[in-house]
């Protein structure tokens, strides 16, 4: 129980990657402040799954795409649990379109959701860490899009690249307070949101083209989050852990050496 006695705030955690992180942290002993957007159809059932693990869980609805929603969430979280030891920042928003046709308002909305919300949440929680003393863990869920310029996702690519650089900047400023700040860069993960965008056939075919032979699962990201949020990663800060089944190395499949005789 590596996180026994810890309290983790996980945003965007009603389903998908956020839920995978929340479950992994709960299985390791953490109590969970579970955030999702107002009116989320998933937050309460996910909270029950966490409680079934023997952990306390507070489902907290808030719109963290706005500063006011972030402030309300952190205030409520501290009132409910008394403190926060871990922040997993996982707001999700992405839309696809050609660059030449990409809507300007949608570009701004993507940066607000996938980048600015991470700033607001991490600043508010970091202020709590510093005032309380004793360090803390901040983990951003980024994406391989931050490094690889996938087509038709100009806003999301830019947001995740900015998030990674922001993470390093925050990590540098919080070193003196012993706050670990890191990112996870998932590849293509099999989540409900992806199934709303792509057909089951497309998803199945995409998994076969990934070097590891399958799409990633929310649990894969959860395991990585558990590591970075635990004392096992005490000596790691300002780093990006890529969890992508080898997507970035996909071209190497065409140059595999023949098996030894």
Image (cartoon, rainbow, N blue to C red):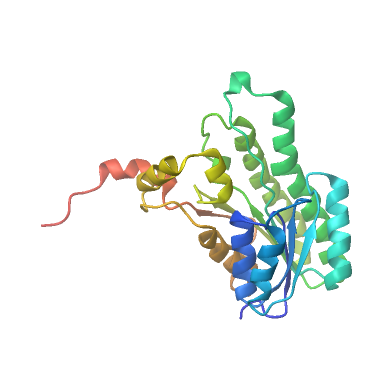
Choose between 203 and 126: the one closer to the eye: 203
Q: Residue furthest left?
A: 261
Percent x, y of residue 237: 64, 60
Query: Which quadrant: the N terminus?
Result: bottom right
Q: Is residue 234 visible?
A: no
Position of 218 relative to 8 (above/below): above
Percent x, y of residue 128: 85, 64
Percent x, y of residue 96: 58, 31
Q: Is residue 31 left or right of residue 149?
A: right
Choose between 251 and 152: the one closer to the eye: 152
Q: Is residue 182 visible?
A: yes
Percent x, y of residue 106: 71, 30
Choose between 14 and 124: the one closer to the eye: 14
Q: Quadrant of residue 115?
A: top right
Position of 123 relative to 80 (above/below): above
* Residue at (88% x, 55% y) in the render: 72
Q: Is residue 163 left or right of residue 257?
A: right
* Residue at (69% x, 49% y) in the render: 91
Position of 237 relative to 115 (above/below): below
Q: Quadrant of residue 51?
A: bottom right
Total label count?
Answer: 0
Q: Quadrant of residue 97?
A: top right
Query: Which quadrant: the C terminus?
Result: bottom left
* Residue at (59% x, 56% y) in the render: 17
* Residue at (72% x, 56% y) in the render: 11
């Amino acid at each position: 129980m590596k996180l026994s006695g810890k309290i983790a705030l996980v945003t965007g955690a009603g389903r998908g990657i956020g839920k995978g992180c929340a479950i992994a942290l709960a299985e390791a002993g953490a109590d969970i402040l579970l955030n999702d957007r107002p009116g989320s159809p998933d937050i309460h059932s996910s909270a029950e799954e966490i409680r079934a693990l023997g952990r306390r869980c507070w489902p907290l609805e808030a719109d963290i795409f706005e500063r006011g929603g972030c402030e309300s969430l952190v205030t409520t979280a501290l009132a409910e649990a008394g403190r926060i030891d871990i922040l997993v920042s996982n707001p999700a928003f992405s839309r696809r379109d050609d660059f030449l046709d990409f809507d300007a308002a949608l570009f701004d909305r993507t940066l607000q959701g996938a980048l600015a919300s991470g700033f607001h949440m991490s600043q508010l929680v970091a202020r709590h860490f510093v005032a309380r003393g004793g360090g803390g863990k901040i983990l951003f869920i980024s994406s391989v899009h931050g490094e690889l310029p996938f087509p038709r996702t100009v806003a999301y690519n830019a947001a995740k690249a900015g998030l990674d650089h922001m993470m390093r900047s925050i990590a540098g400023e919080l070193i003196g307070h012993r706050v670990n700040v890191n990112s996870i860069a998932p590849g293509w993960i099999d989540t409900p949101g992806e199934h709303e965008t792509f057909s089951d056939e497309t998803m199945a075919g995409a998994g076969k083209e990934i070097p590891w032979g399958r799409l990633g699962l929310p649990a894969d990201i959860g395991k990585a989050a558990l590591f970075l949020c635990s004392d096992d990663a005490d000596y790691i800060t300002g780093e990006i852990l890529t969890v992508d089944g080898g997507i970035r190395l996909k071209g190497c499949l065409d140059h595999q050496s023949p098996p030894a005789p």
